[in-house]
Image (spheres, grey):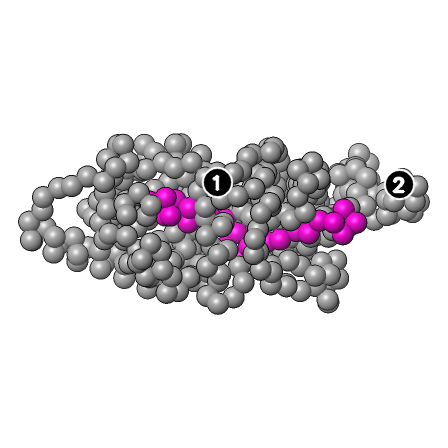
Amino acid sequence: MVLMLRLGLPGRDLVRAPGLGSAWNHWGGTGRVSDRDITAEEEQEEVENLKSIRKYLTSNVAYGQTGIRDVHLELKDLTMRGRKGNLHFIRFPTYDLPVFLQMAQQKQFSSLHTSLCATGGGAYKFEDDFMTVSGLELWKLDEIDCLIKGVLFIDSVGFNGQSQCFYLENPKDPERCQKIPYNLENPYPLLLVNIGSGVSILAVYSKDNYKRVTGTSLGGGTFFGLCCLLTGCSTFEEALEMASLGDSTKVDKLVRDIYGGDYERFGLPGYAVASSFGNMMSKEKRDSVSKEDLARATLVTITNNIGSIARMCAVNENINRVVFVGNFLRINTISMKLLAYALEYWSKGQLKAFFLEHEGYFGAVGALLELLTTIT
């Protein structure tokens, strides 16, 4: 069994690959495979422990109150480096990290000398916790390298016979909006926008040639943090649910609020946001808005900012395909629709926003690929 982690905020992703790689690879501090002598009895005990862990992970869809196995994302009969198996995706929120560590301790993950590869900022932040609580060492891998490897690989294998990549047609029309599969064949160049706690924007010219163009600190962590302050919500899911019920136009000042309609000279429609949270300068309007309105306005503010920066980067890099990934987009159709519409509208049809079904798991998949490259 091989465990891969992508550690970061606001969520943490765990990908498990039963049947891929050796049953109990183990890593020293240098990240190299080490050998050890074991008796037949010890080997049999490890086999039984492995069976027990595999049964626990694959027979449950929830682990405690916050651990979730995304069954709908499982990749079946996948061949990697000549090995065939199913790829399972399990996530725990970072704020509830102790639940995962307790599970690892109770199920004796460390008794198998399981390879625990980690990427993202949390790979450093929580390294001591993994060793202290559950006796697990982390093999830390570069986040950007793993992200791109994971994206390109998952897109190449598809999604159980379906397309991994898609775009949204008619994103502003609730009745006509639909997902359209897209074959990301010959993907280069592409702009990869990874939305987690913050945002990194990467220009990818080939599988080995890519660079970080820029980023912004205003990302998913900003949305969630501001929603906690403004609405008192306690989970990302709750924040999105509130946003889905709110009306951001009560909070934001629009072009029509300033000009009485469209600003035709510069092609600005009346419904465009002129000032995010601009209406909140008025006490009367502050008193009339709901927490749901504030959540929606926060989501629109963060998403519009990301879309604007992505569009400018695409123009500067002369790239017309922009792929958005990251945990921020999980169950977040509002932001996907906003990004899809904004890129196409403001570029006059020259840019299109693409999305991937596995959203925030690509770093973990890239870590798995890196491990398999090392041990084969």
Q: Could you say which is closer to the camera, residue 145 or residue 208? A: 208
The residue tagged 2 is 266
Q: How crowded is mark 2: few (under 14 residues within 10 Å), some or many (20 or more)?
A: few
Residue at 62 percent across and 53 percent down: it is: 354
Mark 2 / mark 1, whichever is N-terminal: 1
Q: Residue at x 42, y 61 (%)?
A: 74
**Camera sees residue 93:** no
Q: What amino acid type should be assigned to the residue bearing mark 1?
A: Asp
- Determine whether 283 is above or below 357 in the image: above
Q: Which of marks 2 and 1 is in front?
A: 1
> Which mark, residue 208?
1
| 342 relative to 135, above or below | below
Corner quadrant of residue 284? top right
Q: Does 356 lie within the magenta span?
A: yes
How far apart marks 2 and 1 lie (CA) works out to 41 Å
Location of residue 25 in the rendering, given as x and y in whole percent from the top left corner = 23, 46
Residue at (32, 32) in percent of width and height: 128
Q: Which residue occupies the foreground of this view, 116 or 156?
A: 156
| Tag 2 and tag 1, C-beta contact below 8 Å | no
Q: In the rendering, at what x and y percent does residue 169 appear? A: 70, 61
Which range is magenta? Answer: 347-371
Amino acid type at mark 2 = Phe
Q: Does the magenta stretch include residue 284?
A: no
